[in-house]
Amino acid sequence: MLACLPSCGPVDPEPSGPTRSLGLGLVQGTDAPGDPAAVALVARRTRCGGEAPVLLCSGALIAPDVVLTAAHCLAVFGEAGPYEVFLGPTLLPEPGPGGRFVRVTRAVAHPEFVPATHTWDAALLRLAVPVTDVPPLRLPQAGDAPVAPGDPVRAVGYGDTKDAARPSGQRRQGLLQVTGVTGSAFQAGPAPAMTCVGDSGGPVLGGPEGNEVLLGLTVSGDVACRTEAVQVRVDALEDFVRPFLEEAPP
């Protein structure tokens, strides 16, 4: 059964069609039933049933009540906008069995976010109730090797697949390979998958199976979703993420 919080707040008019940078599932990817901490960011519905969700972006659960996503995902409604996150493998064309929505009570974009370049393109979301049955994704720690060119990484998201038979709104995964690294971001190419519209804010993971670490967040890429994806480095976001995690929830 689809779970829903009792109060569904008002929502502004639906945004226009997504661009490559707004809501960057995965081209040449596969279903991702084993990634419950990869979530979808949606515009909050006015009622809890009979209303099609509006997919804005993907996101990463990093604490029971905190989701990390891309800052540009807040562009349409702003930090004070009406948001929910969806947990479950199928959001569209309608939420599948076992999926549930959780209301977002607070959204904060990185204070140094530059929309034109996607520099520090990250935002944090506080959930109304903690998600206690889904293990959060593991954040980078001091002993973890930093991301490097040539590394294989795994992206997860709910975005476009460029396949009419596989619409967006399905949680999917795919392998990419890191092609370049800067102090705050890294680039990746297809191996053979590629992120696309709707995957922005979604987790990009690395490391051994069973001990993967959240290396980055998808933030942009080429319009055709074929050659390049750009990710913000999560290890570079520590000064932004840590104080939010340490705050006492309201």
Image: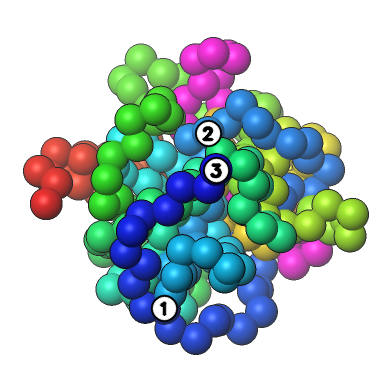
Query: x, y percentage for residue 151?
Result: 64, 27
Query: x, y percentage for residue 51?
Result: 57, 70
Provide the residue designation for mark 3: 1
Q: Nearer the viewer, residue 118 or 61?
A: 61
Quarter occupied by residue 183: top left
Residue 217 is covered by the magenta coloring = yes
- Give the residue at x 21% y 40%: 245
- Give amino acid for label 1: Val
Query: x, y percentage for residue 159?
Result: 67, 55
- Give the residue at x 46% y 78%: 76
In the image, taking residue 234 as reference, residue 33 lies left or right, namely right
- Mark 1 residue crowding within 10 angstroms, few (<14) / some (14–19) / many (20+): some
Q: Is residue 145 above or below residue 41?
A: above
Given contact means CB atoms under 8 Å apart, are the residues at marks 3 and 1 in contact? Answer: no
Residue 97 is covered by the magenta coloring = no
Query: x, y percentage for residue 125?
Result: 32, 54
- Give the residue at x 45% y 70%: 47
Provide the residue designation for mark 1: 11
Can you say which quadrant of the picture contains the N terminus? top right
- Give the residue at x 89% y 60%: 164
> Is residue 144 visible from the viewing direction of this image?
yes
Q: Of helix, strand and loop, which one carries label 3?
A: loop
